[in-house]
Amino acid sequence: MPHIIIDYSRGAAQRVVIDELTRAVHRRVRDGGLVKPAIVRTFAREATFSCVGDEHADNHFIQIIVRMAPGRPAETKRELLKAVLDAAHNVAAPALEEGRLGLRADLYESDPDFAFQEIAFA
């Protein structure tokens, strides 16, 4: 862990290159020295249907959720989340400057008593 989930509103990909944003976030976390590089998993998914604010067709969002195992100090979690948001912002900057786009990042800790996994990565 961490797992990074990037949800975005339908149509946001017309304003932000989601593949580029996903790679930028993944690489920033993977190469940032705060977690083991081999355990970072990142994916993006478009919402089939979404409503944003006043429901204007030009309103879009990108929501990034970082889910990780507990045990890291608060400062490390803040640093990781800031790195995620900075990486995403760098890609989304032109669309953010145009307006009608929200970008947010949140971090959640997974409860190890309720998370089971098998890992076969080298």
Image: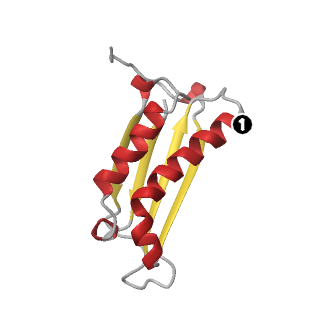
How many neighbours does mark 1 have within 10 angstroms: few (below 14), some (14-19), or many (20 or more)?
A: few
Q: Position of residue 97 (x, y in %)?
A: 46, 74
Q: Nearer the viewer, residue 29 or 114?
A: 29
Quarter of image, res 23: top left
- Which residue is painted at 29% across and 52% down in the image? 19
Image coordinates of residue 93 in percent, x first then y, are 44, 65
Residue tagged 1:
74
Colouring scheme, one of rainbow, by chain, secondary structure, one colour: secondary structure
* Residue at 40% in and 71% down: 95
Where is residue 117? Give x, y as percent: 43, 23
* Above or below: residue 70 compared with residue 25: above
Toward the right, the furthest residue is 74
Residue 111 quadrant: top right
- The image shows residue 36, relative to residue 93, as above or below, that is above
Write down the quadrant of residue 78 in the picture: top right
Which of the pair 28/73 is nearer the observer?
Answer: 28
Badge 1 amino acid: Ala
Q: Give the mark count.
A: 1
Which residue corresponds to the image point at 43% horizontal and 25% vertical from the top-left? Answer: 37
Q: Is residue 31 above or below residue 96?
A: above
- Where residue 122 sits: x, y (%)? 33, 14
Q: Residue at x 55, y 34 (%)?
A: 68
Label 1 secondary element:
helix
* Name of the residue lying farthest toward the top: 122
